[in-house]
Image: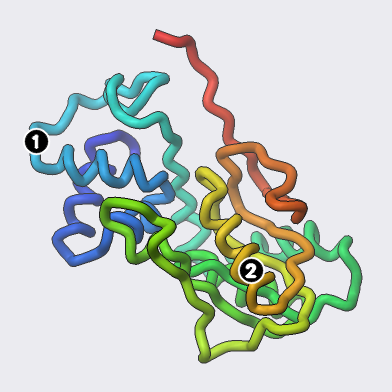
């Protein structure tokens, strides 16, 4: 994807396929607000290429950064290399951790490879945003998959692809603690916020993305 028009087209396609706005945000690695904006724009005339501004994709939309890591995701060898690097960032927390938790959807496959690298069990968490359309996200709830490892009384790592606002990572940390687990560290491919910790849990990233521009 090279411009906003591509994102609008992708958001329209995903919405037509029945994905919620939260799932669209997850697929496109953008915030929920940006996903809403893109879906709404899909019903209007697309903006010309090159209209991105510092205060939003067309100057009046939400401020966000799209991260396209499909060049990694479509190749298993590249995924293994990236997962090895992410596992290396986590390994400093000791050898007692026996569980890696991936945040669905994109964090699941990455977590699988990280778990293999670190020789831990695997769990996955589906965040509340996957149900989100409009309204208060706090009224929704996420869940751990019963097809994977249990959380209670275990130290664990958390794996995802990107941090956009930190809301999903914070939700996952809270869910792990509520289920009796102990999150020791988080790792992502790209962090749009440049956070070092969330709710007392260290956050590591291979890339930190920073938007630099003049205020209009």
Spatial distance from mark 2 to mark 1, Cα to Cα? Answer: 41 Å
Residue 90 in view of the camera: yes
Q: Which mark is residue 80?
A: 2
At 61% from the left edge and 77% from the top edge, which residue is drawn?
A: 112
Which mark is drawn over residue 44?
1
Residue 55 in the image: above or below residue 176? above
- Look at the numbered disc 1 and give the secondary structure of its residue: loop
- Residue 214's disc number: none
Report helix, strand or loop for mark 2. helix
Residue at position x 64%, y 78% in the image: 179
Kindly tell me whether residue 119 is visible in this rendering. no
Q: For the C terminus, which image quadrant?
A: top left
- Residue 184: x and y, percent? 78, 64
Q: Are marks 2 and 1 in contact (CB under 8 Å)?
A: no
> Where residue 76 sits: x, y (%)?
54, 70
Residue 25, placed above or below residue 115: above
Q: Quadrant of residue 97?
A: bottom right
Quadrant where the image shows the N terminus: top left
**Residue at 56 percent of width and 60 percent of height:** 171
Above/below status of 199 relative to 47: below
- In the image: residue 81, left or right of residue 26: right
- Residue 3 location, x and y as percent? 30, 34
Mark 2 vs mark 1, foreground winner is: 1
Residue occupying the point 47% across, 66% down: 127
Q: Nearer the viewer, residue 16 or 195?
A: 195
202 and 173: which one is in front?
173
Looking at the image, is 95 positioned above or below residue 198?
A: below
């Amino acid at each position: 994807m090279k411009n906003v028009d591509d994102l609008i087209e992708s958001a329209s396609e995903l919405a037509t396929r029945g994905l919620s706005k939260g799932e669209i945000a997850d697929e496109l690695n953008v915030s929920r607000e940006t996903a809403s904006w893109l879906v709404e724009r899909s019903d209007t005339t697309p903006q010309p290429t090159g209209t991105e501004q510092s205060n939003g994709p067309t100057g009046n939309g939400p401020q966000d950064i799209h991260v396209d890591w499909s060049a990694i995701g479509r190749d298993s060898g590249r995924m293994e290399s990236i997962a090895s690097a992410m596992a290396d960032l986590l390994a400093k927390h000791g050898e007692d951790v026996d569980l890696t938790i991936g945040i669905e959807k994109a964090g699941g496959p990455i977590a699988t490879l990280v778990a293999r690298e670190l020789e831990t069990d695997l769990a996955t968490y589906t965040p509340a945003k996957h149900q989100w359309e409009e309204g208060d996200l706090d009224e929704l709830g996420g869940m751990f998959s019963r097809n994977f490892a249990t959380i209670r009384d275990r130290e664990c790592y958390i794996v995802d692809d990107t941090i956009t606002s930190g809301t999903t990572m914070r939700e996952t940390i809270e869910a792990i603690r509520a289920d009796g687990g102990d999150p020791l560290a988080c790792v992502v491919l790209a962090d749009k916020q440049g956070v070092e910790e969330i709710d007392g849990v260290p956050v590591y990233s291979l890339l930190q993305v920073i938007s630099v521009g003049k205020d209009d």
